[in-house]
Image (spheres, rainbow, N blue to C red):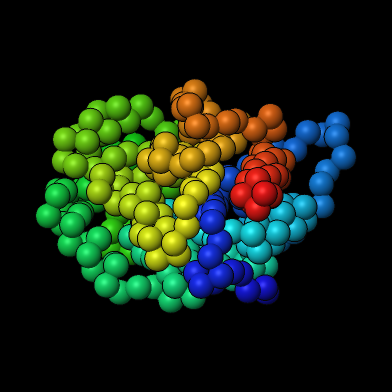
Amino acid sequence: MTAGPSAASGPRHLLACDLDKTLIFSRHSLLLADDRPAPELVEVERLDGAPISFATARSLALLAELHDLAVLVPVTTRTLAQYARVELGVRPRYAIAANGGHLLVDGVPDPAWAADVAAEAAAACAPLAEMVALAERSAAGGWARLVRVADGLFVYLVAHDRAGIPDLTGEAETARAAGWAMSVQGRKVYFVPSVLTKQRAVVEVARRAGTARLLAAGDSVLDVPMLAAADHAIRPAHGELHELGWSGPNVTVTAAAGVLAGEQVLAAFVARVRAEIAAGSR
């Protein structure tokens, strides 16, 4: 693994990048065309001894380049344990897990950050137990194979298949009234406290790292605050935001979908960061 720039070296850009279906992909989400040559895939995650997530070799090379040019911050809704399974070939100084509930510094969660976020969620939103009960009620009928609490912060359901997820408009409205947000990502349905955002943690990383420019990428509703706040953001042409047709004045959309969209996201960021560094040196 390579070590990236420290705050003392003064990198100007912070790149906040979602993981699943933005940078890394399951076999089901690769979306590769049968009539085109397949890119070289690299395993980036294993579970129970089997590979479950991949990125292209080019994506990982671009990621290593960005790690040298900017403050690279993986930003994920994954729990700490789920994030720890991912191997990107670089060791970012900062990472954000549990949708902003955990801020990792040199791979170690900051306990003060976690305590502050948990306390704010407890004060501003309905108790987690209420959302667990809502999730369990919504799972009636057998479409969900499990309901799981993530790091004591939020709850999510995993469907047997994406097509089997029913209309959850009522559940979304109930959650919203209780200060929670609902997001459907592939086979997973998340109920997350509205104050638990990736963007809040990204702002803290920018403060600590002293960066001046924010670049961001993501594919889900839970990424929207982070994307909207970025100086420039990219979303892939797939996923929850693509299905909703969401965009913004600072947001571009990849031409490709699936794992090749991940390549396009990183290539665009490399080009932008290099151009802005060059312009700033003149």
Q: Residue furthest left?
A: 123
In the depicted structure, whether residue 213 falls above or below residue 171: below
> 214 or 219: nearer the eye?
214
Which residue does the image show at 40% across and 55% down from the upper left?
202
Which residue does the image show at 49% across and 40% down from the upper left?
231
**Left or right: where 72 falls relative to 50:** left
Q: Position of residue 219 (x, y in %)?
A: 51, 39
Q: Residue furthest front?
A: 282
In the depicted structure, whether residue 207 falls above or below residue 187: below
Q: Position of residue 185 (x, y in %)?
A: 47, 40
Which residue does the image show at 22% across and 65% down from the upper left?
116
Residue 228 visible at all: yes
Where's the N terminus, which quadrant? bottom right
Q: Position of residue 169 (x, y in %)?
A: 30, 27
In the depicted structure, whether residue 39 falls above or below residue 8: above
Q: Position of residue 187 (x, y in %)?
A: 48, 42
The image quadrant that residue 44 belongs to is bottom right
> 159 or 213: nearer the eye?
213
